[in-house]
Every structure is written in structure tokens, then in C-alpha cells.
Amino acid sequence: MDSILVTGNGPLNGQIPIAGAKNACLTLMPATLLSEEPLTLTNAPRLSDIKTMTALLQSLGAEVSSLQDGQVIAMSSHDLTSQTADYEIVRKMRASNLVLGPLLARFGEAVVSLPGGCAIGARPMDLHVDGLEALGAEIELKDGYLHAKAPGGLKGAVHEMRFASVGATENIVMAATLAKGTTVLMNAAREPEIVDLVECLRKMGAQISGEGTSTIEIQGVDRLHGATHQVVTDRIELGTYMLAPAICGGEVELLGGRMSLVESFAAKLDAAGVSVTETENGLKVARKNGRVTSVDVVTEPFPGFPTDLQAQMMALMCTAEGTAVLEERIFENRFMHAPELVRMGANIEVHGGTATVTGVERLKGAPVMATDLRASVSLILAGLAAEGETTVSRVYHLDRGYEHVVRKLEGVGAKIERIKGQ
Ligand code: UD1
């Protein structure tokens, strides 16, 4: 298995291009199942999660081609042959569950394995099931698979979610586009990836309003048609690389970045002594003075501080002046990076969903292990600022969500290389 070798070597300067959003692409791809006509995505990120979704859609009979070095994904679900999402694919990636709503809406039937993905908590699917049942689906759990049926078709309904789940919102919105009548989804998630999905669905002929607010209204239509859509910028990749100059010093411009995608995160960086300014081409990030100061963080659904940036923020707090309290409210068990950071000399105490980080002057390089996608990149960030060499193993997690990480960081002066495993 490959590993990443990072050597801490001072300030970073230059530009990093930000890719299209993994999480948006993973919900836009299953939207192809809603229509017989082709759906084409541009600005797609080159990631192993995208390959997993490609394999899943192909296993259902969809045609999926990767063009222009993977940045364009051309899909057609004209002739689907299966409505079953198999465990062997779904276990690799939780987002596979996003085929459930579209398959059910188009065929009145879907069989989807309960998901796997990053080991960051229980991650059930009750909110997806409740929402689809509100639209008239009958769903049973048998042998680890959700068997969903809507023999007479889905019907619009008013439904309030108990929690603003991103995936459940996406599944319910996609299903409701082809339901009979109007669906009002309350306490919907407001993430930019949902806004992006709705913009694409609208190009396909769906009638939807309210995306980006907590109430989304969907007027069902008989059929959706083809479209071409550009995937929104990846705000998590953006936030991750914003932390590189915050941790190492220097000044880095994130090309394609927009403040509206990272408002709450940028506010925390500002409070820690890191300036974020909008430029013509993106966002520019630099420390205001010397060492950053500790800031407390609570993860929340958008527009709050994203859980997907918590691990990376912890890496910054490891060398900040003072003590920071990081509270994880979205996922239980999302501090697996903490013991690895401690191996590098960090001072972190974890109690339940709260981590208390007291900054040290400098971290020290060490062999560490990536435990999930965002944890893996937090260890790379920590390694960039540490004294000596850090080897991050199990980098297959990283390949799920960060394209060309070595090239992008090398481009701003980092000493980083990928070591091929046996
Ligand atoms: C999406 C993102 C993931 C991000 C997360 C929260 C994708 C592909 N992934 O994941 O990167 O970390 O949003 O911003 O877009 N829950 C339930 N029942 C359900 C569904 C969820 O209890 O039916 C719980 C989960 O266990 C978790 C919380 O709700 O504790 C948030 O999950 P959710 O918003 O659904 O995240 P995902 O869509 O899986």
C-alpha cells in the first residue's frame, strides 16, 4: 500500500487550483437514473469515490464514460438492466445509497444494500427511509438490503425531517421530482451541494424551489430530460488547502474558491489570526501575524462549521497559542486522527464528542496512519508544519477525496512525495 512522505520545510507560497466537489458529483451522478436522456457533468474531480459511483451506475446498466482526463462524465441511463445496488460496491462508499431515491422514482422499485464508507459512526438510513415512505414507498430491510417499492408510483407529501441530513435531503428531493403532486420537505439540509443538485435537476426539467433554505418545494413532473451541468467547487478541498498557509505560513491563492462556500470556516480562521480575502480568481490566505491563536469550534450542518473540516482544523489548533475546544456534533467517533496527532507531539484530550487541544510550539514528524478521508489529510497538514519527516500510511482514504494532492502541495513549495508500496 502506498504512503505519503512529508517533510516540514517552512512557508508555502503560490496557487492551488480547487477541483469540483466530490460530494456534489456523488449526488449529481445518480441523478442520471431519473432520465432516459444523457446527463453530462463537467468540472468533475478525479477521485476513487467517483470511480466507485461509476462502477455502481454501470452495474445498474447505465453507460458512463470518463472524458477529458476524467473532468467530464457523460452518462446515459436509457437502458437500465438492474434496480439492485449490490453490497460489494455499496460497502466501499456510503454515498452509494443515493441511487435509492432515483431508482424508486423511475421504476417504482429499488433494492439497495445498507452502506459502508468512512468508519466515523453508525450512519443509519432511517431519515432516508422515513422521507421516501412519506412519499408512499413501502420499504423493508431484508438480509442487509433495503427493499423499496412504490407500485402505484410516488406521491407528493409534506414531510419534516428530524435532522437535516444531507444524503436524505438529496434522496428525497430526487425521488420527489417524478412523484405525482407537490412535495414540501421541511428541515431540509442547506449545503451548497444540495443547491448544485437542484440547479442540475432544474436543467433536467424538474420544478423545485427553496434550495439553500430549510424548506424545499418540489412539483412532480412526468419525466426529466437530458442536461449538461458544471459541478460546484469543492468547499472541503478549498478549506483544507486554506489551512496549508495557516499552518505553515506564506500566502496561497486558492483558484476557484468563493467566500460564500466557506463563510463560517473563514470566520474561524480570521479569529485565529489568518486573513482570507477574495481575489478575482479565488481566495487568498495568509497569517496576519506570527503564530495563530486557539479558537473553539462546534461542527454543525451548513452554514455552520463543516464536520468535514474538523480534523484539518484540529491540525491547525495543535500548534496554535492557547487551548481550543473542538466539539463534534454531526458524527460520533470522528476523532480518530487525534491519537495520530498525539504521536506527532500534539497535546489533545478527547472526552466523548469534545476534543481539547492545547497548542505546542512545534509538532515532530512521525509515522502515522490515516483512518478516514479527512483524517488522512489532517495528518499531511500537520506533517507540513512538523519538524522532520512524517509518513502517512493507508493513503487509499486520501485518494477517495483529494485529487493530485502531492502535485498541488508541491506546487506551493511543500516537500511531499508518494512512496509506492508493495
Ligand atoms: C454527507 C457528506 C459527508 C459529510 C456529511 C455531513 C456526501 C457524499 N457526504 O454525508 O462528507 O460529512 O454529509 O455534512 O455528501 N443520519 C441518521 N439517519 C439517516 C441519515 C443520517 O441518523 O438516515 C445521521 C448520521 O449518522 C450523521 C448525521 O445524520 O450522524 C449526518 O449525516 P448526513 O447529513 O446524512 O451525512 P451524509 O449524507 O451521509
Image (tube, rainbow, N blue to C red):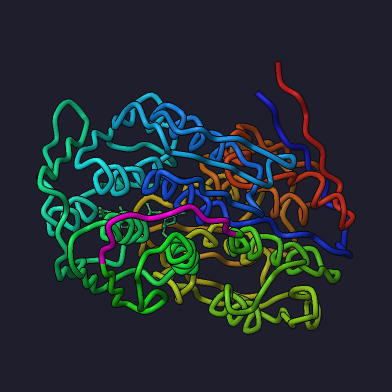
Quadrant in the picture for the C terminus: top right
Q: Is the magenta stretch mostly helix, strand or loop?
A: loop
Asked whether 226 falls inside the magenta stretch, the response is: yes
Say which residue appears at 39% left-offset and 40% top-offset. 96
182 on left or right of 421? left
Tell me residue 32's x, y (percent): 44, 46
Quarter of the image where one finds residue 111 = top left
Query: Which stretch is magenta?
Result: 220-229
333 within the magenta span: no
Specify whether residue 156 is in view: yes
Residue 205 in picture, x, y percent from top left: 41, 63
Q: Total label count?
A: 0
**In front here: 252 or 154?**
154
User: Which residue: 66% across, 46% down?
Assistant: 72
Residue 388 visible in the snapshot: no
User: What residue is rendered at 22% in x and 56% in y?
Assistant: 127
Quadrant (top left/top right/bottom left/bottom right) for the N terminus: top right
In the foreground, 299 or 215 = 215
Instruction: Look at 38% across and 50% down and name the residue there.
Output: 333
Relative placement, left or right, of 116 versus 325 is left
| Vertical placement of residue 343 versus 158, above or below | above
**Ligand 1: image quarter:** bottom left
Q: Classify residue 363 as left or right of residue 8.
A: left
**Horizontal and vertical percent position of residue 303:** 45, 76
Q: In this view, does 196 lie above or below 283?
A: above
Q: Where is residue 164 in the image (x, y as percent from the top left)?
A: 30, 67
Q: In this view, does 224 lie above or below 275?
A: above
Residue 141 lies in what quarter of the image?
Answer: top left
